[in-house]
Amino acid sequence: EAQVTQNPRYLITVTGKKLTVTCSQNMNHEYMSWYRQDPGLGLRQIYYSMNVEVTDKGDVPEGYKVSRKEKRNFPLILESPSPNQTSLYFCASSFSGSSSYNEQFFGPGTRLTVL
Amino acid sequence: TQLLEQSPQFLSIQEGENLTVYCNSSSVFSSLQWYRQEPGEGPVLLVTVVTGGEVKKLKRLTFQFGDARKDSSLHITAAQPGDTGLYLCAGLYNNNDMRFGAGTRLTVKP
């Protein structure tokens, strides 16, 4: 089944404790991205990757890191989480980033709470 | 500030009613997409519109892209409880910059 998977689905952590949210897609997509979703603000892009070893900042990259060592995986790293990073996080992938017809396939989301 | 403004933010209607939700921007987009998101899940693409003035129909849903490619609307005819969800518009800006609106949360009561 074609899908985007994220782990964990739920995470409660404390300020400053490094964490990684994994994202994997099995559709051989070139483009992957991370979003956070907050009430009243919609989905805001954190980072995106056009292909392996190619990453770029989105709208709200501060406090996050990403890497794209393999085509299928795009982990999101919070080196020192803070309470303002409490949010619902989505990973998404698409065939490429620049086509007007690209459909983004979203993972199920990771709900992160930073205490 | 949101690049894409969606209205209304919340909409609660009875089954069988018609509704329209709007997505507006001051920027021109090369394409615009509508997604629907259900609780506990990620957004799922409904439609992509590319040409100014384009109209697409998906069963009871009608999508329109403004002539100037700065706005879009989604019209639902005879809404059903299964239409309940968060409707998001997303504009492709500068070829690889996808911006989402904050969404319209629709509730259709039986």
Image (spheres, grey):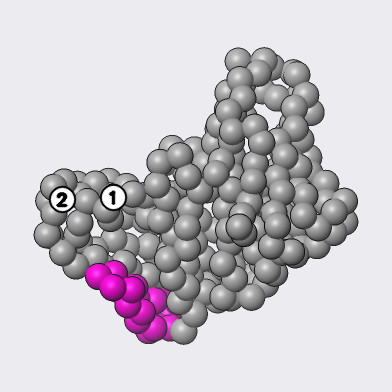
Residue B87: which quarter of the image?
bottom left
Other-residue count near label 1 (Cα within 10 Å), few / some / many at <14 / 14–19 / ≥20: many
Instruction: State yes or no: residue B107 in magenta.
Output: no
Q: Nearer the viewer, residue A5 or B76?
A: A5
Q: Nearer the viewer, mark 2 or mark 1?
A: 1
Residue B16: percent from the left, percent from the top? 12, 59
Is B49 located above or below residue B77 in the figure? below
Is A60 located above or below residue A83 in the figure? below
Q: Which residue is mark 1?
A: B84
Query: Callout 2: helix, strand or loop?
Result: strand
Look at the image and tell me whether residue A44 can be seen.
no
The part of the chain drawn in magenta is B52-70
The image's mark for residue B46 is none
Is B98 on the left or on the right of A58, as rendered?
A: left
Which residue shows up at 51% across the image and 65% down it?
A: B91
Residue B9: percent from the left, percent from the top? 31, 48
Is A43 on the left or on the right of A60, as rendered?
A: left
Which residue shows up at 65% across the image and 64% down it?
A: A94
Which residue shows up at 47% across the image and 58% down it?
A: B44
Look at the image and tell me whether residue A51 can be seen.
yes
Residue B29: percent from the left, percent from the top? 52, 72
Which residue shows up at 74% across the image and 64% down it?
A: A28
